[in-house]
Image (cartoon, rainbow, N blue to C red):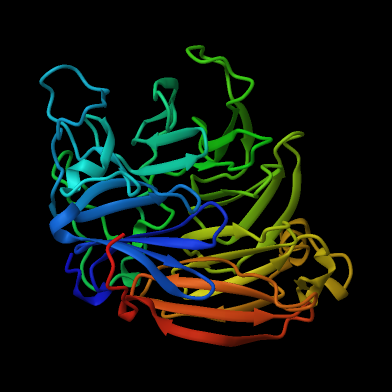
């Protein structure tokens, strides 16, 4: 699929507290501060080639890189001092997960690549926290200690986890074929923000929770990495969240609540990670949609979600009375099927971005007690900031083209 309409962006990711975001591109890597919007650094094509995935570790000097696109530079084992090879000897390898340490001295780009994880199957996602790194393949998830003395701690088999279904009308141009192993060519960029290799990792110091799709259709598996002994096959807790396959999943900052949506994309369900009980059901809409991103506010008072409909929805969690209800809710008793629809909670506020451009969304810093903000970062290079109030009033406060913001310094 041609990259020109999306300006070469192959994936977008916020860091763990949503204060920065990183942009993997055909031309390398860019890292931005969110508020105020500014480029913090970049790695050009000569340094790293084309990139498929980038993951930040908080605001530190460490980045996880996975080559992709049309010209990945490090598509084979690069012979770094510390390489963890997870395939049989002499087996063909896919683009590795490389750890870039910007604080390390060196004139050549390879001098800053300090760690390498190689696999014989494509890496679909990477998640990091201060003491661990999680690498997601199509049917398996690996957990390593990180960054000091990395070693494999856990290995989990998963339900088929490509999540490559998407409505073709959301993409500018025809859908390509499936990603071929070891080619380095990514699936459609609009799939990449959150919908490939589903997994989320709690960044909290107090809770080491990992969530990913369960073996049963529509289920979630929760693993407490702190209480599971390395090398054991402890059974994860399972939540039966949906009837169809899970398409998007997110943990709040303390890891006490998990939110998920299915491939149908009409409902977002929230569960308590301790009791596994459903807390609330939120309705995005009535038409099927592909959800790209779900994120909690820093204090878990609100939740935002983006989809291929081009609408970012904002829901209240702390005071759910702020959410809108169907007008039928005032009618009284209705049948069981209609009752499920009537009882749903609709977003208290929403705003739109270009429907043809996938985006990730997160909450900005509060400007006052009654004014909150949501940030949307789109693969077409645009930055949107909207402020909203508890009564549902929502207005655009800022718009920019982040790809036009340049810093002359390398990362």
Q: Position of residue 50 (x, y in %)?
A: 18, 56
Q: How many labels does the image show?
A: 0
Name the foreground residue: 101 vs 183. 101
Quarter of the image for residue 69 reads bottom left
Q: Residue at x 19, y 37 (%)?
A: 94
Quarter of the image with the N terminus is bottom left
Q: Where is residue 176 in the image (x, y as percent from the top left)?
A: 19, 58
Q: Which residue is drawn at 51% across and 40% down?
A: 129
Q: Position of residue 11 (x, y in %)?
A: 34, 59
Compared across the picture, whether 35 is left or right of 93 comes to right
Name the foreground residue: 180 vs 9. 9
Q: Position of residue 335 (x, y in %)?
A: 79, 60
Q: Residue at x 72, y 56 (%)?
A: 300
Name the foreground residue: 404 vs 245. 404
Compared across the picture, whether 282 is left or right of 63 comes to right
Quarter of the image with the C terminus is bottom left
Q: Taking 354 as reference, is 195 above or below it?
A: above
Q: Taking 371 as reference, is 191 above or below it?
A: above
Q: Is residue 296 visible?
A: yes
Q: Can residue 69 be seen in this view?
A: no
Quarter of the image for residue 391 reads bottom right
Quarter of the image for residue 283 reads bottom right
Q: Residue at x 65, y 50 (%)?
A: 252
Taking the view exactly as shown, the residue that stands out farthest to the top is 232
């Amino acid at each position: 699929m041609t990259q020109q309409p999306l300006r070469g962006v192959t994936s977008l990711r916020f860091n763990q507290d949503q204060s920065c975001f990183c942009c993997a591109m055909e031309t390398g890597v860019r890292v931005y501060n969110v508020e105020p919007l500014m480029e913090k650094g970049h790695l050009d094509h000569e340094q790293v080639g084309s990139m498929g995935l980038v993951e930040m570790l908080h605001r530190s000097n460490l980045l996880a890189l996975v080559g992709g696109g049309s010209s990945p530079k490090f598509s084979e084992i690069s012979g770094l001092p510390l390489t963890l090879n997870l395939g049989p000897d002499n087996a063909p390898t896919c683009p590795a997960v490389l750890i870039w340490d910007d604080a390390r001295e060196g004139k050549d780009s390879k001098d800053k690549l300090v760690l390498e994880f190689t696999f014989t199957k494509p890496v679909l996602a990477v998640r990091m926290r201060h003491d661990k790194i999680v690498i997601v393949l199509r049917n398996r998830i690996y957990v390593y200690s990180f960054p000091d003395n990395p070693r494999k701690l856990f290995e989990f088999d998963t339900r088929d986890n490509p999540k490559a279904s998407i409505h073709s009308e959301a993409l500018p141009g025809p859908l390509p074929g499936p990603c071929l192993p070891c080619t380095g060519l990514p699936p459609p960029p609009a799939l990449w923000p959150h919908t490939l290799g589903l997994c989320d990792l709690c960044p909290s110091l107090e809770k080491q929770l990992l969530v990913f799709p369960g073996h049963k259709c529509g289920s979630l598996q929760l693993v407490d990495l702190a209480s599971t002994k390395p090398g054991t096959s402890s059974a994860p807790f399972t939540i039966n969240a949906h009837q169809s396959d899970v398409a998007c999943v997110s943990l709040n900052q303390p890891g006490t609540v998990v939110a998920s949506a299915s491939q149908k994309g009409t409902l977002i369900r929230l569960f308590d990670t301790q009791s596994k009980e459903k807390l609330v059901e939120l309705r995005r809409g009535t038409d099927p949609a592909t959800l790209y991103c779900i994120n909690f506010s820093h204090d878990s008072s609100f939740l935002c979600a983006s989809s291929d409909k081009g609408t970012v929805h904002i829901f209240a969690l702390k005071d759910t009375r702020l959410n809108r209800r169907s007008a039928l809710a005032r009618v009284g008793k209705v049948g069981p099927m209609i009752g499920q629809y009537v009882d749903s909670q609709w977003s208290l506020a929403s705003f739109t971005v270009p429907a043809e451009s996938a985006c990730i969304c997160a909450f900005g810093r509060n400007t006052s007690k009654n004014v909150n903000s949501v940030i949307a970062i789109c693969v077409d290079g645009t930055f949107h900031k909207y402020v909203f109030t508890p009564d549902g009033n929502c207005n655009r406060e800022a718009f920019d083209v982040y790809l036009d913001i340049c810093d002359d310094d390398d990362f």
